[in-house]
Amino acid sequence: ENVAHQVDLIRAALRRFLPSGCEPHAQQVEVVRRLVYGLGDTILVAKTGFGKSITLHAYSVLTGNITLQIIPLSKLGGEQLDAIRRYEGANLCLVTAETKHTNPSLFSAIRKGTYTHILLGPKQVISLAI
């Protein structure tokens, strides 16, 4: 019953993360709406450059919840990290195979809820006790 109002609110919020004059895609609005309002499992399949990352960032900013993003490659993780860093309020980390050695305090910070976004690969998901 409040769908139109929800869509308008989410669209306005997404505009804040886009360059001036750009409009969010309808799919971005719908994904964020489903996540923010708890409307069920949601999958977004889209090509590179579509703007999938903005949906994850918007969710974290709008709800205060942490986004956990599982990515296939460390290189892709670095690209995602750079893309998300542009968003105001983002505090993120990339967990790689080397993380335990290069930043031993990272996992403690993750447990404390320091980060808004945590990016990691499938191998790290199964091998880490966060």
Image: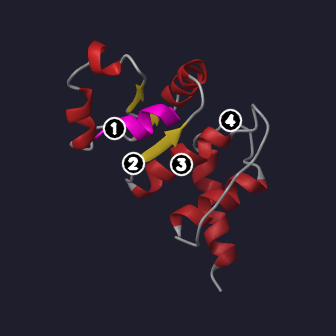
Q: Do the residues labelled 1 and 2 touch (CB within 8 Å)?
A: yes
Q: What stretch is highlighted in magenta?
A: 120-130
Please say whether residue 88 is visible from this viewpoint: no
C-alpha gap between disc 1 and disc 4: 27 Å
C-alpha gap between disc 2 and disc 4: 26 Å
C-alpha gap between disc 1 and disc 2: 7 Å
Mark earlier in primary sequence (1, 2): 2
Question: Closer to the observer: label 4 or label 3?
Answer: 3
Amino acid type at image mark 2: Ile
* Circle on res. 58: 3
* Circle on res. 66: 2
Q: Name the residue under label 4.
A: 20
Question: Closer to the observer: label 2 or label 3?
Answer: 2
- As drawn, 72 above or below 64: above
Mark earlier in primary sequence (2, 4): 4
Quarter of the figure with the N terminus: bottom right
C-alpha gap between disc 4 and disc 3: 16 Å
